[in-house]
Amino acid sequence: MHPYLLHIHERPVTLIKFNYDGDFFITAAKDGDVCLVRTENCERVGTYQPLGDKAGAVFAVDITHDSQYVVTANADGKMVFYTFEGEQVKSIDHGGILKFVEWNQKPGAQNMVVTCNDKFKSP
């Protein structure tokens, strides 16, 4: 493992997702940070941070085929959409603990996502 990756997150990594071209990847972790990393040299070149409060643990991330949009699924029940450059587009209070998110697989028309969540809530 490249030494840069050891210093990106303070809590366990939950997912690493490469973009379609393979020149970037995104890391997600239980510390709520989502980082954009250049594959070539493992340099962190950006982050995805929701507006307002810091995100809870991030369990899932997906990137459109054309690397235009990113979606994150958080343990606090929020699904957040970003441009690839990191600008927040929309936040949806999905509910439950989001464990999975994926863009539909139709290139050029990726306008929907599928999610999976755990409806468990503490009393």
Image: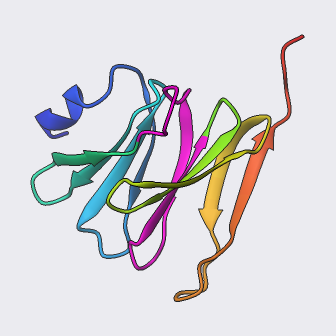
User: Which residue is found at the position 36% from the left and 53% from the top?
Assistant: 86
Q: Which percent across, then down, holds residue 21? A: 30, 76
Rendering coords of residue 109 (x, y %):
59, 86
Between 106 and 52, the one nearer to me in the picture = 52
Reply above or below: 29 against 104. above
Residue that sits furthest to the front in the current view: 52
Looking at the image, what colour scheme do you see?
Answer: rainbow
Query: Which residue does the image show at 19% across and 58% down from the upper left?
Result: 39
96 sits to left or right of 32? right
Q: Is residue 11 magenta?
A: no
Q: Is residue 74 above or below residue 112?
A: above
Q: Residue furthest top?
A: 123
Residue 75's place in the image compared with 47, above or below, is above
Q: Residue 53's spot in the image, x, y percent? A: 52, 26
Q: Residue 107: x, y in percent?
A: 53, 87
Q: Tell me the quadrant of the picture where the N terminus can be found.
A: top left
Q: Is residue 85 left or right of residue 82?
A: left
26 is higher (above) or lower (below) than 6: below
**Left or right of 6 in this view: 87:** right
Pick out the residue farthest to the left: 41
Which residues, given as a range, are shown in magenta?
49-73
Quadrant showing the C terminus:
top right
